[in-house]
Image: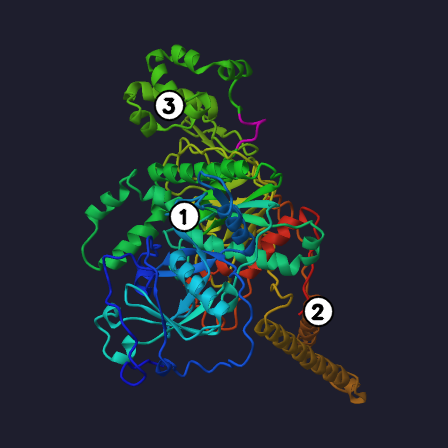
Amino acid sequence: MSSSPGEEGRLPEAAPNHNTPDRFDSPAQTEATGNTPGDLVSPVLDKASPSSTTSFEIVDMETVPAPYREVQPHWFFCQRANDNTSWLPFSREDSDKLERARNSEDEGEVVVAVDGERYDVHVKERKRYAVYWEQGPTQVRRCTWFYKGDKDTRFMPYSEDFSQSLEESYMIAVTLDEWKTKLDFPTGETVILHNPKLIMQYQPIGMQDEWMTSPSEQTQPRTVKRGVDNISVEIPEGEPEKVDHLVFMVHGIGPACDLRFRSIIQCVSDFRSASLSLLASHYKRAQQDGQVNRVEFLPVNWHSALHGDATGVDEDIQRITLPSISRLRHFTNDTLLDLFFYNSPTYCQTIVDTVASEINRLHTLFKQRHPEFSGAVSVVGHSLGSLILFDLLTNQRTRSGAREGVPSGESCQLSCDTLEQTLTRLGLQQYLDTLQAENLDLESLSLCNDSDLKVLGIPLGPRKKILKYAKRKWFPEDCKKGTVLLPPGMQCPLEVTNDQDGNQSSGVTPQQSQFHRAQSITSAVDYEYFDMGIGQVSIEYPQLAFRPQTFFAFGSPIGMFLTVRGLKRIDPNYTFPTCKSFYNIYHPYDPVAYRIEPMIVSEVDLEPMLIPHHKGRKRMHLELKDSLTRMSMDLKNNVLGSLRTAWQSFARLPSAAALPPVEEGETTIERNLEETQGVCEESSVSAEQGEQPEIKVGRLNGGRRIDYVLQEKPIESFNEYLFAIQSHLCYWESEDTALLLLKEIYDKQGVAFEQPQQ
């Protein structure tokens, strides 16, 4: 409905004063900047003309007005995405903490941890800062009054100063029981208090967009509401303070993680929200008993480090990129090339170092903010991120095997040396002051690479000496002639044989290696040294600061990469040195996902484990497919049974004795019918049993199954090619996947899982 100046009495308009700070945020200002106005001038109070009453004023005014009560504030934060600005509420617990901090008498800045302590709010500055990842500060607002236009989808909060002016005018109107009050502001905005339930705001024509075509569009009023309880907004539930388990999630190729081109931070936030919802529904009783609190998920971002200014790889690639189809080439350079970067020794080292250092940094920071945390830690990798974690976990060293290959006396001598003694032994004591100025000790020095020492101004020769010493101390040289360096528990001597010419050659027999390699076709390639022992590039793998409890792979190409590297099979006795559980989770239509179990148990054709639906049943179309399969099997059995009965009846006829002997072909037909029926009966019995018998698939997951497949949605089953890309990116919002993680985590804590009643 529009308010026409000519028909219903023109509202007094004040010309916008652009030199005077606004008393509130206009829609354009709120969406563009979100700034809070500063010094404001009080509005002009006037009695609205009776003719200004519009059709909005259809409210029962005969009721006795309620006494004035102070409005209850609620805190919101600003969120910007895709050039859109929205204001989202904090949970009630966080809002109450912010309100108490605002009312405190502390003179300095007050910092309040919110959103599971993943953000810190500087109350006086009205800013929210991310703790664990890089993100620009966002504005925070104490909100009491809200507005919504005809084209708005949600209510937007006014600035705090403007809300205070509205609250003062509202208090006067309620106390004196005087309504139809008009408030004029210096910017030309007009707010009319028709009654306690009907408050409208009118914008001046001069502030409208110049592309507006009709006067009716220029004078569309806004609905104004007081208090968060009077607007339709979903206030999130607060998170428990105690954390039971910590999970790090590593993304795959590219900066975007789903079809909406969202970052890993946003996708992990959705996965975290899904887990909180599932805990409330599937572990309700355990939560009430205090056995279950929450699981914290933290994103690990390595893409920005690879494509940042430090490496300069983007500039190098851009110089050789063709100008045609620029958008497609930019997408290829930013995403698909990450696969090739990981197979490059230079950039693979950068990627692995970034992932390990970021995980260790997040783990240290989390322990600082949660000193009472005593739970376990798990890791999740999506797509290429799962391969990075697989290589990283394969090359972890246990304490007992970390110093293999180094004599005990030398190990003791190395561990007892100080930085000064080490540099003196290397003849580099002149660089002691340089390293001490950066607070470097032997352990931190071992984490430095060539570029780090170059930044410190150390020449090439001394750099090589230091790096060689650090490598010998922390990464012992186990790759001497006649041996191949494998992860702990996988070392196996190369079998040295003599050929006909008397030359010696070396090779690994399948019985000696736990990673069985197929015979190399390109014998010209000589992997003299590689950490993986399975064709991975020669890099130094950093060590994690903890032992992961479980490794979850989403849509993982691990099986394909291992096969391409020359692996034929994985020994059933192999397990990660520091991680005892491994789950390979994938969507049936995911084009990037590959299985792991056939590489361990090749003699048995195992179907993957079907992940149950989070509502406790199979999807309807899958149940229908199973029913049709059983029906067809029963029909086939009945037909074959009828044929066999007819044949036996024919053979028992009295005249059968007078007939000539049965030929060999007929006997063969009867035998085939019996065998076919027997096979079908066995298949029917196994189909009726439903569950597959428990099969040991090696120690990689403690003897349990490894491959787990999601149930496709009914619409996805119509065209698997159409939903292929979406299937590779569905894991972040998959409740079935989140529930599988939660069941694995809490099963090891002895917490029972309960299926909610539908």
> Does the rendering let one see residue 405?
yes
Q: Which residue carries the number 3 mark?
A: 438
Q: Residue furthest bottom?
A: 655
Q: Nearer the viewer, residue 585 or 296?
A: 296
Q: Residue at point 41% right, 36% down?
A: 353
In primary-sequence order, the first of circles 3 and 2 is 3
Is residue 493 shown above or below 558? above
Segment tinted magenta in the rendering: 397-402
Q: Nearer the viewer, residue 62 or 467?
A: 62
Foreground tag (1 vs 3): 1
Foreground tag (2 vs 1): 1
Q: Which residue carries the number 2 mark?
A: 688
Mark 2 → mark 1, Cα distance in angstroms: 61 Å
Mark 1 → mark 3, Cα distance in angstroms: 32 Å
Is residue 96 shown above or below 172? above
**What's under tag 2, amino acid-wise?**
Glu
Q: Nearer the viewer, residue 307 or 682?
A: 307
- Secondary structure at badge 1 equals strand
For residue 127, which numbered disc appears in the image?
Answer: 1
In primary-sequence order, the first of circles 1 and 3 is 1
> Does the rendering let one see residue 83?
no
